[in-house]
Image (cartoon, rainbow, N blue to C red):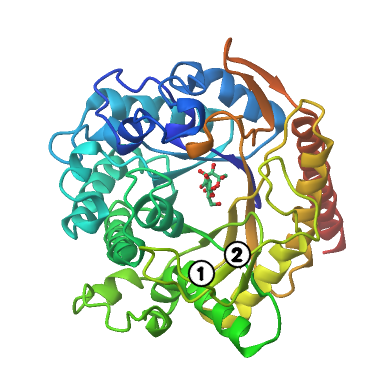
């Protein structure tokens, strides 16, 4: 069964940050620091999904969606990151999973979507190797409670974005600006992923994957300098996170002056490279890269620079709309990894636009779904729209609206947009097609 879903994340929708024993996360801390988010927005209330989840589940059921990717807030389960579990936190996800199953919606929880318990940040966050093990312990607690109903799991969301924005550039929590010294964060997340895979398997999981943010990298020209810069960026954004998982080896980071990776210990890569049942791909847009100019002071000098993509329409966020980039990405993953590439699930794809009559979002989704179909020889088994609801868009606060459903953040009123009804029609025509194909097949035989 092809999975048609939407995706959300705990801190972006739940609110209720100090209810029922939830501990503080790094996003609570960060968003309350002056100047960190646009207009000082925080996730304190967000979409109030913690209280309104029955309405949100009903919206999904009404659209005919058969899967839902959400994330579990580690600080709801283990308020201080480790130690005793908080039963009320487990109960919340337990009820949500029950409600989804009752409506025939496959729950697809992500175990980490950036809201690290603050207590673990106080021990160094993902710079501290120990966090990988604490992550696996937390995952085991969740699996024990939910794995009788949850068969499909995602370990991490976008370890690249968490490392670069959170620890490299300071634009996301925990707000560190370490540039390339953030690299151990990649490894410790990937090690945590591997240990979590083991914990999930031990708990009886059937389908385990990770969601990586991937981008096709376009060199600004065919000059050797631009090609080398593009290759360096591809290494950092895509291959640093896909290679170890799919091939058991890190790509060559000598373009960054870091060939040694001294934080990798014997045996780590075996843990990281365990077989997966799927690879989650989050795609938004391609990236154009040019040779580096003068390094910004303190940046340590990177072997690439971003170049604007100006020849395409853009979303309200200013991101270029390039549906064919998704086809390009999928085909290049297949070319790079061959038989080592597991089935693909598009675990995020979407765009920010204002308004309820969101024809631009319809065009975006239509184009990207067509691009998935056009990708040759790639086994894609699911597609999740980011996002069900307008929500807390991290450093952008409530300014960027990615939802199929509009949220009035004053009243919490949900209003399905034109794209919601469009997707509903698409899914129902798909299932009618699938049914008649099945019928035709059974009359043939
Ligand atoms: C993240 C989401 C985010 C979306 C849009 C992805 O990188 O996983 O949390 O809201 O992009 O920026
Ligand atoms: C946004 C994040 C997003 C990231 C990568 C940032 O500008 O704030 O939400 O995940 O870009 O796409």
Mark 1: C-beta under 8 Å from nearest atom of ligand 2? no
Label 1 crowd (10 A; few <14 / some 14-19 / many >=20): some
Say which residue appears at 69% left-offset and 47% top-offset: 318
Q: Is residue 83 visible?
A: yes
Mark 2–mark 1 distance (CA, rounded to whole Å): 7 Å
Q: Which residue is mark 2?
A: 215
Say which residue appears at 87% left-offset and 63% top-offset: 444
Residue 407, x across and y down, in percent: 63, 21
Q: Are marks 2 and 1 in contact (CB under 8 Å)?
A: yes
Which quarter of the image is occupied by the C terminus? bottom right
Residue 275, x across and y down, in percent: 40, 70
- The label on residue 97 is none
- Residue at the far top in the pictured view: 411
Say which residue appears at 85% left-offset and 49% top-offset: 436
Relative to residue 25, is residue 173 depicted above or below? Answer: below
Relative to residue 236, is residue 30 depicted above or below? Answer: above
Say which residue appears at 40% left-offset and 54% top-offset: 169
Residue 273, x across and y down, in percent: 36, 73
Residue 102, x across and y down, in percent: 53, 28
Relative to residue 141, is residue 208 depicted above or below? Answer: below
Label 2 sits on a secondary structure element that is loop
- The label on residue 238 is 1
């Amino acid at each position: 069964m092809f999975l048609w879903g939407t995706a959300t994340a705990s801190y972006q929708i739940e609110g209720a940050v100090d209810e029922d024993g939830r501990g503080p996360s790094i996003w609570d801390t960060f968003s309350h620091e002056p100047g960190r988010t646009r207009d000082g927005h925080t996730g304190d209330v967000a979409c109030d999904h913690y209280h309104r989840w029955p309405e949100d589940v009903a919206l999904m059921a009404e659209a005919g969606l058969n899967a839902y990717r959400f994330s579990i807030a580690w600080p709801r389960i283990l308020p201080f990151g480790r130690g005793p579990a908080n039963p009320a936190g487990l109960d919340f996800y337990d009820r949500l999973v029950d409600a989804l199953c009752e409506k025939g919606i496959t729950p697809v929880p992500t175990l980490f979507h950036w809201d690290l318990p603050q207590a673990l940040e106080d021990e160094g966050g993902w710079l501290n190797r120990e966090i990988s093990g604490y992550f696996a312990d937390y995952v085991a607690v969740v699996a024990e409670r939910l794995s009788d109903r949850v068969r499909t799991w995602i370990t991490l969301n976008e370890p690249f974005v968490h490392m670069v924005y959170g620890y490299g550039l300071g634009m996301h929590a925990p707000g560190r600006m370490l540039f390339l010294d953030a690299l151990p964060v990649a490894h410790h997340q990937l090690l945590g992923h591997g240990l979590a895979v083991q914990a999930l398997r031990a708990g009886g999981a059937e389908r385990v994957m990770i969601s990586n943010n991937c981008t096709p990298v376009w060199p600004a020209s065919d000059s050797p300098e631009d090609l080398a810069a593009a290759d360096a960026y591809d290494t950092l954004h895509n291959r640093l996170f896909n290679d170890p998982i799919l091939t058991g080896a890190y790509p060559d980071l000598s373009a960054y002056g870091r060939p040694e990776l001294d934080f990798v210990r014997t045996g780590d890569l075996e843990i990281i490279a365990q077989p997966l049942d799927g690879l989650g791909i989050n795609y938004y847009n391609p990236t154009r890269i040019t040779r580096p100019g003068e390094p910004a002071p303190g940046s340590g000098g990177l072997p690439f620079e971003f170049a604007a993509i100006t020849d395409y329409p853009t979303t309200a966020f200013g991101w270029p709309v390039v549906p064919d980039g998704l086809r390009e990405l999928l085909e290049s993953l297949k070319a790079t990894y061959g038989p080592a590439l597991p089935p693909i699930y598009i675990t995020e794809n979407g765009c920010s636009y204002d308004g309820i009559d969101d024809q631009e979002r319809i065009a975006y989704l239509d184009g990207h779904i067509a691009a998935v179909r056009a990708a040759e020889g790639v086994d894609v088994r699911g597609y999740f729209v980011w996002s069900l609801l307008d929500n807390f868009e991290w450093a952008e606060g409530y300014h960027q609206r990615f939802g199929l459903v509009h949220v009035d953040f004053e009243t919490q009123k949900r209003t399905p947009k034109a794209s919601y009804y469009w997707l509903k029609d698409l899914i129902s025509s798909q299932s009618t097609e699938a049914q008649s194909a099945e019928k035709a097949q059974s009359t043939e035989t």
